[in-house]
Image (cartoon, coloured by chain):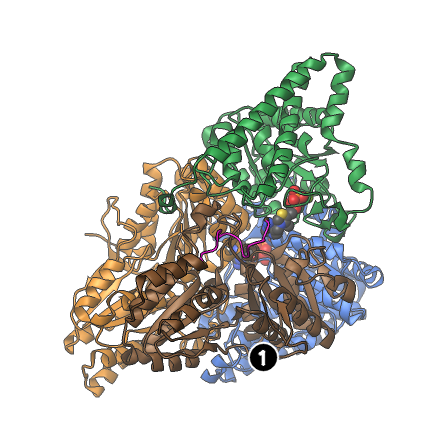
Chain colours: A brown, B orange, C blue, D green
Amino acid sequence: MRKIKFNQSVKEALTLSMLRDKKVVLMGLGVTDPKGIFGTTKDLGKKFGSTRVIETPTSENAITGIALGAAIKGMRPILTHQRVEFSLLSMEQIVNQLSKWHFMSAGKQKVPIVIRMIIGKGWGQGPQHSQSLEVLFSHIPGLKVVAPSNAFDAKGLLIQSIKDNNPVIFFEHRWLHDISGNVPKKSYDIKIGKAKIIKKGKDITIVSFSEAIVQVMRIYKFLKINGIEPEIIDLRTLRPIDKKTIINSVKKTRKLLVIDNSWTTYGISAEIISIVTESIFKKLKKSPQRIGIKNVMIPSSKELAKHCYLNSKNILEKIISITGKNINKKKKNLFLKKINTSESDIPYKDFKGPF
Amino acid sequence: MRKIKFNQSVKEALTLSMLRDKKVVLMGLGVTDPKGIFGTTKDLGKKFGSTRVIETPTSENAITGIALGAAIKGMRPILTHQRVEFSLLSMEQIVNQLSKWHFMSAGKQKVPIVIRMIIGKGWGQGPQHSQSLEVLFSHIPGLKVVAPSNAFDAKGLLIQSIKDNNPVIFFEHRWLHDISGNVPKKSYDIKIGKAKIIKKGKDITIVSFSEAIVQVMRIYKFLKINGIEPEIIDLRTLRPIDKKTIINSVKKTRKLLVIDNSWTTYGISAEIISIVTESIFKKLKKSPQRIGIKNVMIPSSKELAKHCYLNSKNILEKIISITGKNINKKKKNLFLKKINTSESDIPYKDFKGPF
Amino acid sequence: MNKLYRDLYKKIYKIRCVEKKISTMYKHQEMRCPVHLSIGQEAVAAGVCANLGKKDEIISTHRSHAHYLGKGGNLKNMIAELYGKDKGCAKGLGGSMHLQDLDNGIFGSVPIVGSTIPIGVGIAFYSKFFLKKNNITTIFFGEGATEEGVFHESINFASLHKLPILFVCENNLYSVYTGLKDRQHVNRSIKKIVESNGIESHTSTGNDVLDVYSLAKESINKIRKKKGPIFLEFKTYRWLEHCGPNWDDNLNYRPKGELKSWMNKCPLKKLRGKIFSNSKKNNTLDKIEKKINYEIENAFQFAKNAKFPKKEILNKFIYSN
Amino acid sequence: MNKLYRDLYKKIYKIRCVEKKISTMYKHQEMRCPVHLSIGQEAVAAGVCANLGKKDEIISTHRSHAHYLGKGGNLKNMIAELYGKDKGCAKGLGGSMHLQDLDNGIFGSVPIVGSTIPIGVGIAFYSKFFLKKNNITTIFFGEGATEEGVFHESINFASLHKLPILFVCENNLYSVYTGLKDRQHVNRSIKKIVESNGIESHTSTGNDVLDVYSLAKESINKIRKKKGPIFLEFKTYRWLEHCGPNWDDNLNYRPKGELKSWMNKCPLKKLRGKIFSNSKKNNTLDKIEKKINYEIENAFQFAKNAKFPKKEILNKFIYSN
Ligand SMILES: Cc1ncc(C[n+]2csc(CCOP(=O)(O)OP(=O)(O)O)c2C)c(N)n1
Ligand SMILES: Cc1ncc(C[n+]2csc(CCOP(=O)(O)OP(=O)(O)O)c2C)c(N)n1
Ligand SMILES: [Mg+2]
Ligand SMILES: [Mg+2]
């Protein structure tokens, strides 16, 4: 199978969906611009014309309401926010209107809208351009919330999100955009609401999602070599959440660590832990734990920001402590030194800022 | 001590704070109107004049930013939203600006703003006027989030919130406004970040907040008479959360039930459960549990809405099941019948709609 | 009697009587939801909607009864909705603030001020670029909604894409209990603001339904032709309290005599006056009124007799298939 | 040489050279934050700020370097901020998009389009009702920000309360890569929109600093007297890419020749032209330039040599005491 980057895979999902269904349109600031939302919409304007790829004013709130109005008539709009923070201007529409419109119409109207929200970190973005905020949407009945961690899932989930007749919040982490993966050329669906066991294991269940999965996978091999076999679950969908897959896994491993992509306090990880302790408390052998980004505003300076992000050492230590398995200290330090990238504020070595 | 209603106590807190500090101002739609925000601001405009009690246009987003601008210069604005849903229009200012301004200024500027958000239920308000949404704010570093359950706490916490140099989200449940309690005449502070053990007990720790506390207290006596002694904790502050009080209590009772004022999925209760299981997992004898309102949109029709709200029967059953203590079925049913109000969509018997 | 007059009279009389009936019946505590009545403001809904076809879409606000009825919304389903019943136009899920009737082009109403404005723009966006039919979308809102940013974002977008929209602002001088002077500078002109966005705009009195009708007619014809939006502001006045069934002049938030002077401009009386100077056929009106009175009685009976929705419905509309 | 000319020249030259220096030094990957440079737009910041005292407040956007420098913001602290250092004006917490210098009346800048507009209004609200001094607040923003609802909400409030605010809109025709015609109807007039809110408004060219200066001067005098807001729109142009240190005309999102024609209206050249026709004292300029060049070199040295902030700072500003 071909390897393509995450952003290419998003673009393929958009392209195939727009070819399949003429009602699918792209809307947002920058969708037609030469950079094309981190490459994900590049040249789509030329391909599909300005009725299908609609550049918009900086009016996030109205655009969201406009998408709703068009959607209940039959359009299938895909909105894009280059930073999740901009979408906060449209919170009223998302939380009060989009999520509830189907219900408020007693099932007579439907709201097939996808809102792509780009989240991220690094390159000194600072406190207002580095948030994730997944929980603000995941709390709301009526919304679906999707957050793929790789190019393959991104394509299948986005295609499915576009087919879905409900408002779907689609989180794309900027650092994933440049990571390649095996992606079939053809169109395929990945079901919303289904987590994926990306590594089978028996010693501990690690639940994670979005870019945090990348951070987990960086230490996976080392764990295996050293006799720790984690079962790693990629949530992929945050709402509705796939309780079954999580619970079945923890039933087996009897240990749980959640690696959150964002702040843990009142975060996604709190729900995962609650689901498990509510349902199979007796099965748990150890206290379930969570790690996320530091519960503070993310500063601009790279020397500060690096203390806020997920950190391989912390993840490793937590796993060791929960599983109770020991790893030679020297080996551990050597490994951590090796995987330490020179700079923690860029997604790959030859990256030249700014985003 | 005098008994006054919750809304009177809020008004006293506002009045005393405005008398104490000339920089304290009230802003919002309706603050000067004849109904005065459920009685909480009635006549304050006449007392303090239009420079201190400022009627505003329906421009929630700008008003929040204006409050921020005035606050960094020295004003201490108190904003009011008659429904929490209106505040969603100002999410951008709250999440990106207010919560982070102190940080972004490296400590040089401060943001003493209180945003009163009125939450509620009942009288057919329907899906857009019955939400609580506490978690949307509680997830955000830099905000403080307060949610009193009674007139005494309301006064002390509001006075303290107004003195606080940070943005404080102050949740007032509409159904509490009419409930009386003992409230000293003088000004007093209740510390933000401190939960309160409202009933000492040994059989189970029940954590709750805001109007949900009322629902818990409705069955308290019955529990005691029947040999169940719950320790009941009123969170009072949702952020920063008082981990210590919760943990110490559960260390003792070794059982936990969280009664959420809102939706449980990704809700406040998830965090409480996670805090406990993360910290004192080994102490827990039973699976920690949570109950909240139904995880759906709240419908208008009273016959539907009643299935969504907290329900004494469910709470009681949960407590019985967690504590493992038995209560005579007949007695239980009799009691439940007795406390059942004729209509579940009004706060008190002689209430005549609308809100 | 002139057919137009008859149609307009039907609409105004129906709106007035439905609202009055709600107002009297409310005390029985069976309509358990907030209601924002339109008594005094009927002419705008009637005059505008008389120009709209079934396929033309409207969208409204918390104060939507008049628009719903003016546009021909089903009365039984409306009253049942207020009673929280299964036969309600939203099966009791929404109440008075969430009226809709898709069969008659009424796409919705919500109680968040300003929020339906962009939604209406979206409907028109679809009409223009996808439906390519001649239908137009009418967006009703109060002058308070023009204080919300989303209004301004919406008119910019509507103007930019030349959408077939009739914006109808009912300026009733108040937002809840707050008068205009506390919310907008005296020199602020909504009409000019909209105009400065490149949209044709007009201000007019809103209590003479014939004035409303002809301005709306002219505007709608233009929209159908050039397919750009037009904005109309109508000055009008609400008689009862902001929310609820009662009079509230005793609260003194409105200047003494203001209500009375507006009651003298009663849309119903005004139209009746014109009809009587034009025609003597008193009994036509009588017949109309009787028929409507009967219809209203029926609708309330229907609503009362209807069943409450079943619990199962709660989980049914969380997601659409 | 005329003192005014000298002051304006200093400001423009400094802004230009700082931006150019950032642009050249950026490739060393030590300023690790987004930068939105103001080259081409210097005249607005210079001309407006030359009329402001230290106590007058300004607030700005993602593109704030020119305003910060024009208003007399500390250069060393600014560059250190871009380098993420402890001596930065926000101790490295904010980066280029969060400049501020309270000592010089610069209250902040943030990268969310439009969001500082109400904050500026709030500052003025305080000034008027509590400070009761004569200071005025200047709010800088781009034409893109006028598409945000919050802008409209803010001007309504400013007008209603007659606040001492100078609204300065730099219309550089673009929002990121998107030209005006894709965002606003050709007949939309920001000036007229604001005017219709009851606010005196003017449109002017923005590349001749003397024009900017006198319009701002006149406006500011009026504001100080009648204490109501005034709105100014200046047409200007950004030369480099929207975000980052490079030229980007090769991307072809701007019509061919447009950049060149605007470069011919270079604010620096324009002013130099006026000075030379007015005075021969070439070496005054030389001296000014040398001094500024030296200052800039110094600031970059300072920034490079400064330390990174310590980890402990992370927990220090979550809450204020
Ligand atoms: C966003 C928002 N803010 C505040 C309110 C409270 N509110 C309910 S109705 C209303 C009045 C709005 O006035 P206007 O738009 O003129 O409509 P009218 O009631 O006069 O018909 C307000 C402010 C609301 N529903 N939504
Ligand atoms: C609310 C919001 N939406 C979108 C963006 C993305 N964005 C960053 S700068 C910018 C351009 C804004 O244009 P303008 O206000 O004209 O300022 P200019 O860059 O031209 O100086 C945009 C849209 C943002 N930062 N904030
Ligand atoms: Mg009104
Ligand atoms: Mg611009």
Is residue A55 left or right of B112 when viewed as pictured? right
The answer to whether residue B47 is magenta is no
Vertical side of D66 occupied by C266: above or below? below
- The amino acid marked with disc number 1 is Ala
| Residue found 41% across the figure and 78% down from its top | A246
On the rendered image, what quadrant is the C terminus of chain B found in?
Answer: bottom left
Question: Which image quadrant shows ligand 1?
Answer: bottom right
Closer-to-camera residue (B60/A304): A304
Q: Residue at x 74, y 48 (%)?
A: D180
Q: Is residue D101 left or right of residue D202?
A: left
Q: Which residues are magenta?
A: A340-352
Can residue A3 be seen at all in this image of the molecule? yes
Q: Position of residue B334 (x, y in %)?
A: 24, 83
Q: Position of residue B191 (x, y in %)?
A: 27, 49
Q: Where is residue D244 shown, x and y percent of the image?
A: 63, 44
Q: Nearer the viewer, residue B226 or D9?
A: D9
Q: Chain of mark 1?
A: C
Q: Which residue is mark 1?
A: C299
Classed neighbour count for the residue bearing mark 1: other residues with Cα under 10 Å, few (<14), some (14–19), many (≥20): many
> Is A248 situated left or right of B286 in this image?
right
Secondary structure character of the magenta stretch overall: loop
- Note whether ligand 1 is within 8 Å of mark 1: no
Relative depth, front residue between B87 and D217: D217
* Residue D122 appears in the figure: no
Secondary structure state at the residue bearing disc 1: helix
Residue C283 picture location, percent across and down: 73, 74
